[in-house]
Image: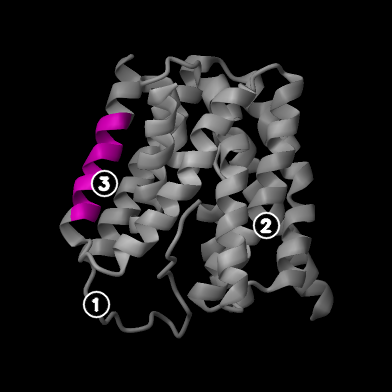
Amino acid sequence: MIGLIAIGVAAGVVAGLLGVGGGVLFVPGLVLFVGLSQHQAEATSLLAIVPVALVGTIRQDRYGNVMRADALRLGLLSLAGAALGVALANALSGAVLRDAFAALLIVVAGQLAYRTLRPAREPPRRGRLRGGSDRLD
Amino acid sequence: MLAGRSARLAAIGTLAGLFSGLFGVGGGAVMVPLLVIWLGYEAHAATATSLAAIPFVAAFAAGVQALYGNVRVLDAALVGVPAVVGVLLGTALAQRLQGRALSLMFALVLVASAVELVAQ
């Protein structure tokens, strides 16, 4: 129980500090420190994300940053994909899912390193608005 | 143009949902860059709007996972509720700390976790 709370607080601090999403931290924490299977850890992470994202949303909404109509549409339009994603996860073996997740961690680590190391003033590329995302969930 | 916008939102939502359901994460890593690139969102608005969509995605995906018997509700509460406190602490700290070395150190922690997962 102490372990679970420690994972929650530690993941939360890192998420708030570095702008990395909670799930990327919950899943390995639950597998490596609590001993859940990859499937259980992913499922449990999904539920654990809900309060974190809700509180973050309320804060961001106060700053006027949330485009409410788009957020609602995005949320509702994602449900079919989410069901499919869960079905896909459950069709895969724990080992394959775990390896895929490990690959995801490497990508997130790469993004984080790139964001940290790139020059502060990057010229716009081909006139597009790019990157600079503060929080990856 | 409006139809185009709806189609783009639907595409972003579907991709984010797939990603979220498959990996047990919120899907912000998919939504934020696509909102910026496809809908011209400014970074803060993209982050905030993606965050607001996540409770829908994550709660629904967790519900589907529950049908497979994979969700540990008590564990989720014990991790998720303290995490709220952690995030508030982390965002407050972020105002005071220069995160460069910290970010790189943490990138290494992620890589180590990946290796540990695969080596298990």
Q: Residue at x 56, y 77 (%)?
A: A63
3D distance between C-alphas at marks 1 and 3 = 19 Å
Chain holding disc 2: B
3D distance between C-alphas at marks 3 and 2 = 26 Å
Residues in magenta? Answer: B102-113
Labels 1 and 3 touching (C-beta < 8 A): no
Q: Are marks 2 and 1 on the same chain?
A: no
Mark number, residue B37: none
Q: Based on the displayed image, in which of its 4 quarters is residue B91 positioned? A: bottom left
Residue A104 in view in this figure = no
Locate the N terminus of chain B and report the quarter of the image it occupies: bottom right
Q: Is residue A51 left or right of residue A114?
A: right
- Residue bearing the label numbered 3: B107
Q: Which mark lies nearer to you, 2 or 1?
A: 2
Residue A2 rendering spot, x and y as whole percentages: 39, 24
Position of residue A124 relative to residue B29, above or below, is below
Position of residue B85 relative to residue B111, above or below, is below
Q: Residue at x 79, y 68 (%)?
A: B6
Residue A102 rendering spot, x and y as whole percentages: 39, 31
Residue A123 in view in this figure = yes
Sort mark 3 into few (<14), some (14-19) or many (20+) by Cα contacts within 10 Å.
many
The amino acid pointed to by label 3 is: Ala
Labels 2 and 1 touching (C-beta < 8 A): no
Q: Residue at x 74, y 32 (%)?
A: B63
The amino acid pointed to by label 1 is: Ala
Q: Which mark lies nearer to you, 3 or 2?
A: 2
- Residue bearing the label numbered 2: B53
Locate the C terminus of chain B and report the quarter of the image it occupies: top left
Badge 2 element? helix
User: Would you say residue A1 sits in the magenta stretch?
Assistant: no
Query: First in sequence: mark 3 or mark 2?
Result: 2
